Image (tube, grey):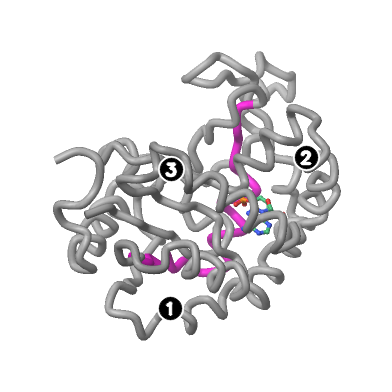
Amino acid sequence: MALNLIMLGPPGAGKGTQAERFARSRGIPKISTGDILREAVHAGTEIGERAKTIMDRGELVSDDVMIGIVRERLQRPDALSGFILDGFPRTVAQATALDDMLDGGDPLIVVDIVVPEALLVRRLSSRLICEDCGANAGMSGENPADRMMTAGTGIAAEPMRCRRCAGRLVQRSDDSELVVRERLKVYRTSTKPLVDFYKTRPTFRSINGAQSPDRVAEDLAFAIEAAGGHGCGGRP
Ligand code: AMP
C-alpha cells in the first residue's frame, strides 16, 4: 500500500522540515510546490516569471497552474509508492482536484501542524535558506541579521554557508514581515478552511507544531501510524 500524505498548517509551521525528514526516513519523495515554483523562478521559465510577482506579494498562484504541476509530478514513477505533499493543497479547489487524482487509489493521510501565530512570525522572519540549493538552514528563533555581524562590533562577518552545498544563506524574499503578514492572512482565508474539508475523515490528524523539531517528528510519525500509515511507503 502506498503512503499518500499531505501536511496542512500555516507558513512557518515546519511542514517543509518535517516533510523532508519523514520522506527521507521512508524513502518516498517530498513534493513541495513552493520549492517547485522557486526552482522555476531560478531557471527563469515562463511559469517561474509569472509566479515570482505573485509569490513576492505573498499571494497564491492560480489553482489551474498548481493543479497542473502536481498532477504531472504525481505521475512520475517515484511517487507510485507514496509521497508527501508540502504546500499543496492550499485551497478547497486544489483539495478537490487532488481527491480526483487519487480516486480509487490508496487513502490520503492528512496531518495538520498547529502553531500559534505569534511564533510563526518570529520563526519566518529568522528563517534562512540557501541561495543555491534552496535548503532550509533551520529556524532557530534568533535574528539572522545578528548572525551576519561579528558579535558586538556591528561589522559584517562572512556570510553563513549552506551545510549541504556551501551556498550563501539568505532570507527568502517572501519572508519579510510585511509579506509574512499577508501570507498568514491568505492562509486564514484560503487554506485554513481545508481543516474543515478534511477533519471528518478517519485519516485526519492534528499535531502540536510549537515544540522542538525532534518532538514534532515523533508526534508526526505517531499520527501517521494512527491514521493507518503503518507499513506503507517505499521502504520497510
Ligand atoms: P511555500 O514555500 O509553501 O511557503 O510557498 C511559497 C509561495 O509559493 C506561496 O506563498 C505561494 O505564493 C506559492 N505557492 C506554493 N504552493 C502553492 C499552492 N499550492 N497554491 C498556490 N500558491 C502556492
Residue at 46% over, 40% down:
76
Residue at 34% over, 80% down:
201
Report the amino acid beneath label 2: Gly
Q: Are marks 1 and 2 in contact (CB under 8 Å)?
A: no
Mark closest to the chain's N terminus, 3 or 2:
3
Asked if residue 108 lies in the magenta stretch, the reply is no
Residue at 82% over, 55% down:
57
Mark closest to the chain's N terminus, 1 or 2:
2
Instruction: From the top left corner, tell me how far across and down residue 104 is, in percent.
Output: 35, 68
| Residue projecting furthest to the front | 104
Instruction: From the top left corner, tell me how far across and down residue 4 is, in percent.
Output: 35, 56
- Front residue (pair 215, 34): 34
Residue at the disc numbered 1: 198
For the record, the magenta segment spans 109-130
Q: Is residue 195 left or right of residue 34?
A: left
Note whether 199 is above or below 157 in the view shown. below
Q: Point out the quarter of the image occupied by ligand 1.
A: bottom right
